[in-house]
Amino acid sequence: MKTQNIASHKNPLGGSIEIIKQTFTSAQDKPVKRVSFVAGLHGDELEGVYLCHRIIATLRQLKATRPQAFRGEIHVYPAVNPAALGSATRLWPFFSVDMNRKMGDKNVASLPAEFARSLIEDLQASSDIVVDFHASNLHLKELPQIRIIEEFDKKLIPLAALCNMDVVWVHPSAPVFESTLGYNLNRKKIATLVVETGICLRIHQDYCEQIFQGMIHLLRQTGVLDLADPSPEIKQPLLVHPKQVALVQAGHAGLFVSDVALGTQVQKGDALGTIVDAVRGEVLETVTFPAEGLLFTLREQPVTYQGAPLARIALKETL
C-alpha cells in the first residue's frame, strides 16, 4: 500500500489539513481498470469513512497474502474533507462551504475550492471508475442505494447493478448537481457512482457490510481483483425512474411517530405513522401510503412541519 498526500494546507490553529490517498498497485504492468473510492466530502457523513476503513484493511491483508490477485489499481480517499470531519459538520468550518458544491469550473478562489480542484484533478488522472460514498441528513434514513442522473444512466446502470444495493434511483438533471463531484467526473467520461445510505453522524453496520460486499463484487466483476474463492450472492437492485418514486409529506406540524420499518414492502392504505400534538395529547394525522411499493426513505427526526418529507416509496406501478 502506498500513501500519498494530494493536498495540504497549514491549519491556522496548528497542524495541517491534508487529503490522503491510499493506493494498491496492480501486479500487472498495465492495470485492467483503475477504481477509486471517495468518502467524507461532507464531514457529518461517516458511513463512507467506515466503509473506506473496511476496504483498506481488507485490501492490505490481501496484498500481503495474495499480491497477484491485484489485476487492476485501487485508490481509496477515506477523508477528503478533513476539516469538516474533524468537527463532524457537513460544511467546511470557518468558510461554511459545501465542498461538494465546489467541483465545477466556475468557482471563486478559496481554500475549499483549491482542495476540491486538487481532488477532482487527482481522481481524473488516476481513475476509470469512481464510487462516491454519502449518507443522508439527520432527518431521513436511506436504504443502501445508488443515485444516477438521467443523462449518464446507460453507462452507469450496469455498474450500479454489481454493487449489492437495494435501489438504483435514476433522476432528472438539475442545476444543483452541476457543481458536484459525481456530475463533473461523469461529464469528464469517468464512470462515477454516487452511493447514499443510512443517516449522518451514525454508522449502520448492516448497511455498511452490505455495501462493502458490493464493492468487493464490483472490483471482481470489473477484473480489478482476481479471486478464486466463490463470490457471495448479491442483491439485484430495484431500478426506479423519476415517475416511479412517491414522496409522502406531513400535513401538520407536530411529532411524527413511525409505525413501519425501513425496507418494508408496503400496500396502498397501509399506515406509515401518526403526527401528534404532544401538548394537547391529540393525534393530528394518521399518515398512510398512497401506493404499493418499497419504503426506501423514512423520516428519523420526529419534529415535523407542514410539508416535511416523511417517506419515499419506490412504486410497483407508476401513479
Image (tube, helix red, strand yellow):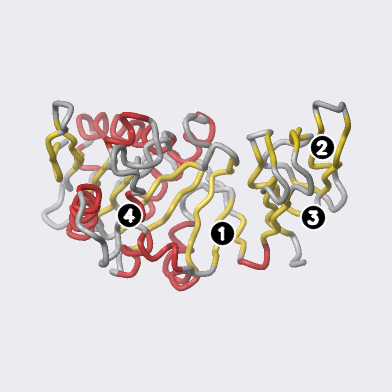
Does residue 93 appear to the left or right of 296 in the view shown? left
For disc 1, the marked residue is 169
Residue 64 visible somewhere in the drawing: yes
177, above or below 116, in the image:
below
Distance between the alpha carbons at the discs numbered 4 and 2:
41 Å
**Cβ–Cβ below 8 Å for labels 3 and 1?**
no
Q: Residues within 10 Å of mark 4 (few under 14, many from 20)?
A: many
Distance between the alpha carbons at the discs numbered 2 and 1:
27 Å
Which circle's residue, 4 or 2, is located before the other in the chain?
Answer: 4
Secondary structure beneath label 3: loop
Between 179 and 205, the one lying in front of the other is 179
Write the residue at 43% across / 70% down: 152
Which circle's residue, 2 or 1, is located before the other in the chain?
Answer: 1
For disc 2, the marked residue is 274
Write the residue at 36% across / 56% down: 101
For disc 4, the marked residue is 130
Write the residue at 82% across / 37% down: 274
Q: Could you tell me the amino acid type at mark 2?
A: Thr
